[in-house]
Image (cartoon, helix red, strand yellow):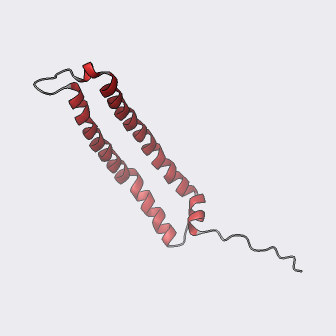
Amino acid sequence: MSDVPAPGPVETDYQRVERSDEFQSLRKAFRNFVFPMTALFLVWYLLYAVLSTYAHEFMSIRVGGTFTVGLIFGLLQFVSTFVITTLYARWANNKFDARAQAMREEIEEGQL
């Protein structure tokens, strides 16, 4: 019998990268932007759904011609989607993508 321990499972490249400080920092930055933005949008959407269901008279108020508060809130759902998308794209371009690309290059060169 040999006193050499049996080899354990081999760590994959992804597992090695996932443990790195750089990856954890990048992941934290992503979550710090995405989770609050998602929560904000869901609250806004649920407010619209709840008002549509339970505040029928309020949502039926006419605001110039045939436009109602409900229609305006519904259209603002689309506007908020575009605003969030624009904010994310700007944030990613200015603060996230360069860090992710640098990390990718380090991984591909075997430095990380």
Residue 51 versus residue 75: which sits nearer the camera? 51
Residue 20 versus residue 70: which sits nearer the camera? 70
Looking at the image, the residue that sits furthest to the left is: 65
Please state if 86 lies on the left or on the right of 98 as rendered: left
The quadrant of the rendering that contains the C terminus is bottom right
Looking at the image, the residue that sits furthest to the right is: 1
Residue 82 versus residue 28: which sits nearer the camera? 82
Please state if 92 lies on the left or on the right of 111 as rendered: left
Residue visible at 45% across and 63% down in the picture: 102
Q: Position of residue 65 (x, y in %)?
A: 10, 25
Q: Position of residue 7 (x, y in %)?
A: 75, 74
| Residue 58, above or below 90 | above
Residue visible at 16% across and 22% down in the picture: 62
Where, by quadrant of the figure, is residue 47 drawn? Answer: top left
Residue visible at 46% across and 68% down in the picture: 105
| Residue 11, above or below 58 | below
Q: Position of residue 44 (x, y in %)?
A: 35, 33
| Residue 83, above or below 43 | below
Residue visible at 29% across and 46% down in the picture: 86
